[in-house]
Image: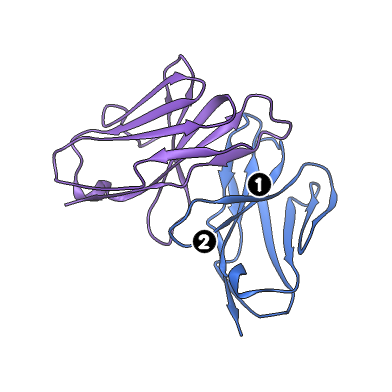
Amino acid sequence: GAVVSQHPSWVICKSGTSVKIECRSLDFQATTMFWYRQFPKQSLMLMATSNEGSKATYEQGVEKDKFLINHASLTLSTLTVTSAHPEDSSFYICSARHLAAEINEQFFGPGTRLTVL
Amino acid sequence: GQNIDQPTEMTATEGAIVQINCTYQTSGFNGLFWYQQHAGEAPTFLSYNVLDGLEEKGRFSSFLSRSKGYSYLLLKELQMKDSASYLCAVMDSNYQLIWGAGTKLIIKP
């Protein structure tokens, strides 16, 4: 149990276009979902925390108008990178916290590799 | 500020034992997690400690001392597939995960 999926797995797009990444908890309900970004050979960087039905909380330095997060249900959160540029190329990973979790563990999706040309 | 420290890289031999240390300073404590991350993949959960002591799970064990702000991950009978980055993360008083930079473990035959 506790499986999180992400779609797409990887995407290549032209500079200036927008890209939407979906994060789904497949077999559990997630009160909270997290979006991370990871550059090569670096650790995870939390971008934002999203709770179902409310606005996402963004970390300092993350532009909320550029990285749009929608958490429409307890099993789905989306991250849209608007007007993507080459510097946005990164590995984007979502995680979900189980509604009934005993230890507040975060279950990670497989990640989405974004390359902006 | 909040801080998680762990070595950048370690090398060990197949079949041996390795200990990866993690020290932390956070605002509050709601548990410490260890995750394994292979290159190009998302992290996978290894262990969770919230009370002092040793938690054993097969070849992997994790230890916590809250008074010292210290944890270690112990990997026994190392296999080549254990080559990965190991991430230490502490959940603070706001239930936010604070991540270490990760320790890259290289296993040699």
Q: Which chain is purple?
A: A
Quarter the C terminus of chain B occupies: bottom right
Element marked by disc 2: loop
Callout 1: chain: B
Per the image, the residue denoted by label 1 is B25
Q: Residue at x 47, y 32 (%)?
A: A24
In the image, is B4 to the left or to the right of B47? left
The colour assigned to chain B within the rendered structure:
blue
Q: Which mark is residue B38?
A: 2
Residue A108 lies, in percent from the top left, at 53, 42
Callout 2: chain: B
Residue B5 lies, in percent from the top left, at 61, 57
Q: Residue at x 54, y 26 (%)?
A: A32
Element marked by disc 1: strand
Q: Reply above or below: A92 against A58.
A: below
Quarter the N terminus of chain B occupies: top right
In the image, is B40 to the left or to the right of A86? right
- Answer few, some or many: residues within 10 Å of disc 1's Cα (few below 14, many 20 plus, some between 14 and 19): some
Q: Residue at x 47, y 55 (%)?
A: B41
Q: Nearer the viewer, residue B91 or B38?
A: B38
Q: Residue at x 66, y 31 (%)?
A: B93
